Structure formats: C-alpha cells, structure tokens
Amino acid sequence: FEQAIGILKSHQEKQEEESQEGADDELQYDNTNAQCSVAPDTNCSPSMSATEYVKYSMDYVTPTNQTVVAEASLYEDIGSMYVSMQKRPWQSDPSIFGCSDKFQEPGYYLSVSPTLESSMMCATSVGDCDDKANAFGSLLIASGLFAEDEVRTALGTVQFGSKPSDIGGHAWTEVYLAEEKHWIP
C-alpha cells in the first residue's frame, strides 16, 4: 500500500508541477481519428432515494466482468492505471445517452462507450464521474491491488463554479488503507 500511495503522491506532485508550467503532455488525449457507429442504450437509471442511490452505485463495481479483468491485466502498477483513467474524457449523460442520469456498467464503459456515435472522442472510453469511478474501482479490485472491501465509489457534491449555486453531484473512487486505517480518494 505504501508503494501505491507513493506512486499516487509522486504522480500528483508531478501533475501539479506540469500544470503550473502549462506543459502536461503526459495526460494529453490521444487523437484516434476513429469513426463511432454504435447507437447508445438510452434507458436511464431509475429514480430512487439517496440511500438506494448509494447501493445502486455500488452494484456497478464489477471486478469479475471479463472486460474489466482483461483491462486490469494491461497495467503494471496503480500509477499506470491511474494515468490511463485520467486520459479518458468526461462526457455528460445527456450528451451521450440523452437522459439526465445513466450508470454504465464498467464492461460497457470500457468496451462499448468507445464506439458510441454520441461519443465526443471515438475509440476512447467516455462517461461521467460515476462511470469513471465505478470502472476505476472495478479495475483496482480486478488487478489484485485492493480487496473488494477496500474499494468504494463515494457519492457527494462539489462546487463547480464560483457562485454558491454552482453545486452539483459527483462520484469518485476511494481506497481503504488498512495500515493507516482510513479511506483516501
């Protein structure tokens, strides 16, 4: 765990340095010039209470999915997996699926979303924060870096702009560090 945390801290420090210099080449999106041709599934996530929503979200952490297992095997360490997830662009559910809230299963996010005709970047997984968080959590477990009870998708709110009303929902991956007895995003 210490090595994983060291890699994440080192990567974050490097990223902060490079963004200050305006030269963050490592995280630039790859231009594929691919054509997307698959119509997205337009079934929205159901309405539910906040408690039900959290449980619903955790059902989308699927580390035994074969697409997730195959993707997890591509990474040598947590740092390379983290960078790969950062390179995948955020795209809103309305622009992809035409509905306000849709959870993608990690296997769908990793294998189908790169082919969706509504994708802003063909040949690259696209989704919003819950899709990225659930996929990353699934990959962390599938890779063997963390046990299932050491990974979760956190749901909350964040300030998106400078006005007090610029608050919206957000999801992110957290891992539990047993030695330090706390969760880190």
Image (tube, helix red, strand yellow):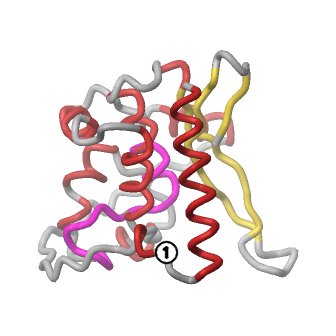
Start and end of the magenta stretch? 119-135
Q: Residue at x 33, y 44 (%)?
A: 106
The vertical placement of 77 against 1, above or below, is below
Residue assigned mark 1: 24
120 on left or right of 132: left
Q: Nearer the viewer, residue 136 or 113?
A: 136
Q: Nearer the viewer, residue 5 or 155?
A: 5
Give the number of callouts. Answer: 1
87 on left or right of 129: left
The vertical placement of 168 against 163, above or below, is above
- Spot the residue most to the right: 164
Q: Position of residue 34 (x, y in %)?
A: 13, 78
34 on left or right of 82: left
Q: Residue at x 52, y 57 (%)?
A: 129
Q: Position of residue 164 (x, y in %)?
A: 87, 75
Is residue 163 inside the magenta stretch? no
Q: Residue at x 64, y 42 (%)?
A: 185
Query: Which quadrant: the N terminus?
Result: top right
Q: Position of residue 92 (x, y in %)?
A: 47, 70
Q: Residue at x 19, y 32 (%)?
A: 66
Three-letter residue code for mark 1:
Asp
Q: Quadrant of residue 71?
A: top left
103 on left or right of 119: right
Mark 1: secondary structure: loop
Is residue 133 inside the magenta stretch? yes
Q: Position of residue 86 (x, y in %)?
A: 44, 60
